[in-house]
Amino acid sequence: MASCVLDGHRLIPNRSLWIDFVTVRNASWRHGNVVLLGDAAHTAHFSIGSGTKLAMEDAIALAWAFRDTDDVPAATAAYEAERKPIVESTQRAAQGSLEWFEGIGRYMGQEPRIFAFNLLTRSRRITYTELQLRDPGFIASVDAVFDGRPPMFTPYRLRGLELANRVVVSPMDMYSAVDGTPGDFHLVHLGARGIGGAGLVMTEMICVSADGRITPGCGGLYRDEHTAAWRRIVDFVHANGHAKIGCQLGHSGRKGSTKLMWEAEDEPLDAGNWPLLAPSPLPYQPGINQVPREMTRADMDAVRDDFVAATRRAAEAGFDLLEVHMAHGYLLSSFLSPLTNVRADAYGGSLENRARFPLEVFAACRAAWPEERPMSVRISAHDWCDEGFTDDDAVALARLLRRAGCDIVDVSSGQVSPDQEPAYGRSFQTPFADRIRHEAGIPAIAVGAISSSDDVNTIVLSGRADLCALARPHLHDPHWTLHAAADQEYDVEWIPQYRSGKRPPPTGKGDGIRRAPVRRFDAAPDDLDAPPARWRPRVSA
């Protein structure tokens, strides 16, 4: 095609170095009477076009700092304090744009309107709602791909399971079970979210054995009375509204036998500790947590069988979806990470070896789980540590999971090592889900600082993930999805007991009803309006 258009002439490129762009960051921009400005202090990828602007703003800020004082150290310190947060925010946006262009090949099969939307929202600063205000005709045209409804309210099917929308109540440990048995608290907690409009409600990590609990308050599925207690909750969710409910199964590994989170996070019990298992005898926090026993093949057999028994109980309890927890440094996750798995046998070394036992557990659960019901796996797509598990590893693992029969990957990150340095920010883990969805060819759930319906619409419409899981927003508001529908003036069904609350109350100002703005929940300690940088070594002068 190119030869036809160019009539055989050679295409002459310019010297745009977009692929090999080096991002410069400096711990300090000043030393004595020497001050760094512009590209000497920081760089931002060409695709957002702000390099000259940043340099000029640096110069203006430095001049204004000296207007206020003749003291050189004080003025340069004030300049850096004012400019650095602004520049770092811009660099996060630039990093998101850089990575989008680096991975542009993964989007080439997208429908042209969706591709255009993806391009416009690549830095995650411009969103669905903002584009709707700027160009309602364009958003109407891309909404047509989703039958004219907000993308978050389109149904989604996994095997025989159909979800009413793309919202997931993310697993949240409540530490409120008694000897593994969930009680009234769990019924109210999960039941309230079950009638709150989300398509799928996930349980906390349900432990497959007493010794596989994180804390004494963790729920379990290793006794018959546990099955009956979970069935009570599942039956309530199914009987009240349209939500489906999923069971997340896991084993704590080296992070077990600790106090309740609000007592002391990740610290061992004062008394009554149980023995811990791990792929390698490495404590989570040296000198604080127990040293786990390195697992033998017999230990692996026993743990696998515990997962299978719990899977059968989950099916008996009526759960719609089963998720195997391979994230956050718990047992199966610790096999996957080279930071926590230093074995020299067939279960250590290469990623294929490190994934051998987790995949064996998944295959055994898949064989015990009803064929028509889907299975997911939660992974930590990055350890946020040097020499740890990376997003490249996550894509490779997702391919292995797809071949093993996994239906969708729940993409989290971190919590594997206490030395992690995550790049928090607005929907900061979504790029990992994006890569897995497009490069591994498997559906993905995005999770992490997704805080508004605008975020969900943007992620789903751009094709970065198929479902979005939200945790803290659902603690703040159990009916978050119903309220998101009202905010967007989209009609969804409420349960009959709550139907009279569907219409927002009058404001008292005239006869009209005031529509709430897009709700954003402050779910991360960083700037939610700017995306984070993917974990990369920093380049310093």
Image (cartoon, grey):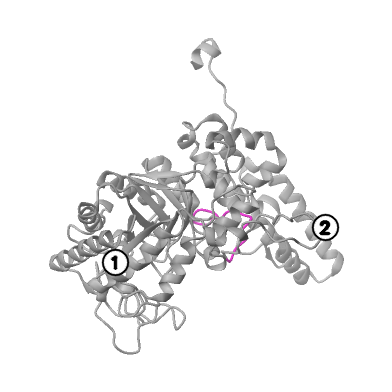
x, y (%) of residue 358?
25, 58
Q: Residue at x 32, y 71 (%)?
A: 229
Residue hosting label 1: 331
- Is there any visible trace of residue 541 in the rendered image? no
Decide: is 216 above or below 64. Answer: below
Residue 535 belongs to magenta span: yes
x, y (%) of residue 199?
46, 53
In the displayed structure, does residue 290 sit left or right of residue 445?
A: left
Q: Nearer the viewer, residue 94 or 442?
A: 442
Location of the C terminus by quadrant is bottom right
Decide: is 440 above or below 520. Answer: above
Q: Residue 73's image quarter?
A: bottom right
Q: What's the distance in space between the residues labelled 1 and 2, CA to CA? A: 59 Å
Q: Residue 260's image quarter?
A: bottom left
Amino acid on which disc 2 is placed: Gly
Residue 466 belongs to magenta span: no
Q: Which mark is residue 510?
A: 2
In the displayed structure, does residue 316 sit left or right of residue 43?
A: left
The secondary structure type at the circle numbered 2 is loop
Give, as a single range, the part of the protein colored magenta.
525-539
The secondary structure type at the circle numbered 1 is helix
Q: Residue 518's image quarter?
A: bottom right
In the displayed structure, does residue 313 sit left or right of residue 433?
A: left
Amino acid on which disc 1 is placed: Leu
